[in-house]
Image: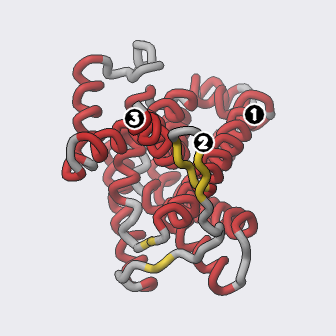
Amino acid sequence: MAEVLQQLVNGISLGSIYALIALGYTMVYGVLKLINFAHGDVYMVGAFAGFFAATAFGWGFLPALCFAMLVAALFGLVIERVAYRPLRNAPRIAALITAIGVSLLLENLGILILRPDPRAFPELIRLETYQVGPLIVNNRQLVIIATSVVLMMLLQFIVTRTRMGKAMRAVAEDTEASRLMGINVDRVIAFTFVLGSALAAAAGVLVGIYYTRIDPLMGFMPGLKAFVAAVLGGIGLIPGAMLGGLAIGVAEVLVVAFISSSWKDAVAFAILIMILLLKPTGILGKTAEEKA
C-alpha cells in the first residue's frame, strides 16, 4: 500500500506537467477546432528559454520561469499569425497538415541551432527529500505540483472572471455570433495561443528541473501524451485537460512501477484507443451536434 501511495505522488507530479501542456491543446481546440500539433515543440522552446535564462543570465527559478513563459508566448503568437491565421477559412485538413509542418520545422531548427546533444538543466532548486510516514517526497515534486496548481487556478480565473476569458468562451460557443456582437475574434484566438504556449513553457521548465535533461526533440512524446490527456478529459474542456493530464501521469508511473518500463509510452495510446471506443467525448465531455 505504501508503494502504491508513493507512486501516486510521483504520478501526480508527472501528471501536473502533462496537464499544463494539455491545457494548450484543449483551449486552441475549444476556440478554433484545431489540433495544434506544434504545441509540444513550443514546450521544448520554453524549456530551452528557461535553460538559457539560468545559464546565460544566472537567474533563479521564478525569473527563468517567467522568461520562458514570455518567450514561448511570443512563439505561440507568431505561429498563430503566420501559420494558422491565413488558413482560418481553409479545410481543416490543411490546418492540420500545417500544424505537423510547424512541429517538424521547430524540431529541425532546434537540432540545427541548439545541436542535437542533450543539455544538463541547471540546478535551479537544490534537491531536498522529506519523509512523511511511509512516503518520501522531494521539494522538486512539491514545487512542480504547487506551480501547476497556481497556474491552473490563474487560468481558471482568466477564463471565468475576465473580459477576455468571457470572449474566449463566446468564441468557443459560436464564432460568427461573437463577431456580430463586436468581439475581435482574431485577438481572442491569438490570446488563446499566447496563453496555451505560456503554460507549455512552464511545463518545459518544470520538466528540466525534475529530469535535469533537455533536448530539441523532447517535445514530441510529451506533446502526444498531453494530446491524449486532453482527449481523455474531454477535448475543449479546461477541467477535462487537468483531469486527463493527472490520469495519464498516474497511469504511466504505475505501469512503470508495477508492470514494465517498456510500456511507459504505450499506456497513453492504449488509453486513447479505449476512450475513443468507449466514450469518444472524454470523461467530462458531452455529446453535441456539430454546427454545419
Q: Nearer the viewer, mark 2 or mark 1?
A: 2
Disc on the earlier residue, 2 or 3: 3
Can you give x and y, in whole percent of width and height, for residue 10 in the image?
46, 45
Position above or below: 64 against 234: below
Residue 11, given in percent of the width and then of the height, sits at 44, 42
Residue ID at (36%, 46%): 225
As shown in the figure, which amino acid type bears the numbered disc 1?
Phe
Q: How is the image coloured?
A: secondary structure
Which disc is residue 100 wearing?
none
| Of callouts 2 and 1, the N-terminal one | 2
Q: Amino acid at mark 2?
A: Val
Q: Residues within 10 Å of mark 3 (few under 14, many from 20)?
A: few
Q: Earlier in the sequence, mark 3 or mark 1?
A: 3
User: Which disc is residue 157 wearing?
Assistant: 1
Q: Which one is in front, 34 or 21?
A: 21
Q: Is residue 97 left or right of residue 34?
A: left
Whether 109 is drawn above or below 190: the answer is below
Q: Residue at x 66, y 34 (%)?
A: 168
Tell me the quarter of the image containing the N terminus: top left
Given the image, on which type of amino acid does mark 3 rest? Val
